[in-house]
Image: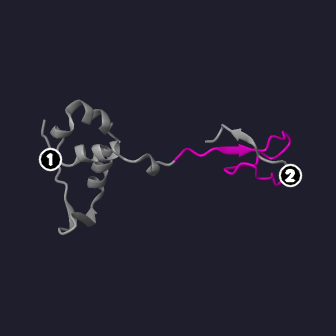
Amino acid sequence: MATTTMILKMKLLIDTKKNRVLFAEANKDVVDFLFSLLALPVATIVKMLGKESMCGSVGNLYGSVENLDYSYVPRPKNFFKCSYTHCNDYVTDSSGVSCPSCGYKNRHIYTDVR
């Protein structure tokens, strides 16, 4: 059985003074490969192997996310539904807003958001 080797190429424009990538150009295979890496449970892999044994900056990335301040993590939104049963299921993310159909205040937390 013959094995094939795929070569992945990227063009990067790097600002060496600020040590960051300004522009990246890649084909679909490279993007698919990067997305497959992002789909892996990185936290589990880093915990098993340790941050020091990770290649590249994956360990640093995990450490940065691990030390992220909670003020940067968005809180889950609450949604409110009109409690009057004959309304047209008006849902809003603001508590106390009047329903446009009946005028009642929306105070019932809506849990069936998809």
Based on the picture, tell me whether residue 42 belongs to the magenta stretch.
no
The picture places residue 16, in percent across and down from the top left corner, at: 17, 68
* Few, some or many residues within 10 Å of mark 2 (<14, 14–19, 20+): few
In the figure, residue 87 lies in which quadrant?
top right
- Residue at 87% of width from left, 50% of height from top? 102
In the figure, residue 100 lies in which quadrant?
bottom right
Main SS class of the magenta portion in the image: loop
Q: Which is more foreground, mark 1 or mark 2?
A: 2
Give the mark nearer the N terminus: 1 vs 2: 1
The picture places residue 41, in percent across and down from the top left corner, at: 33, 36
Under tag 1, what secondary structure?
Answer: loop
In the figure, residue 42 lies in which quadrant?
top left
Based on the picture, tell me whether residue 82 belongs to the magenta stretch.
yes
Q: Quadrant of the C terminus?
A: top right
Part of the protein shown in magenta: 75-102
Under tag 2, what secondary structure?
Answer: loop
Q: Amino acid under label 1?
A: Thr
Q: Which residue does the numbered mark 1 point to in the structure image?
A: 5
Please state which of residues 3 and 32 is positioned toward the viewer in this rendering: 32
Q: Which residue does the numbered mark 2 point to in the structure image?
A: 103
- Residue at 63% of width from left, 41% of height from top? 113
Q: Amino acid under label 2?
A: Gly
- Residue at 40% of width from left, 48% of height from top? 69
Taking the image as shown, residue 98 lies to the left or right of residue 1, namely right
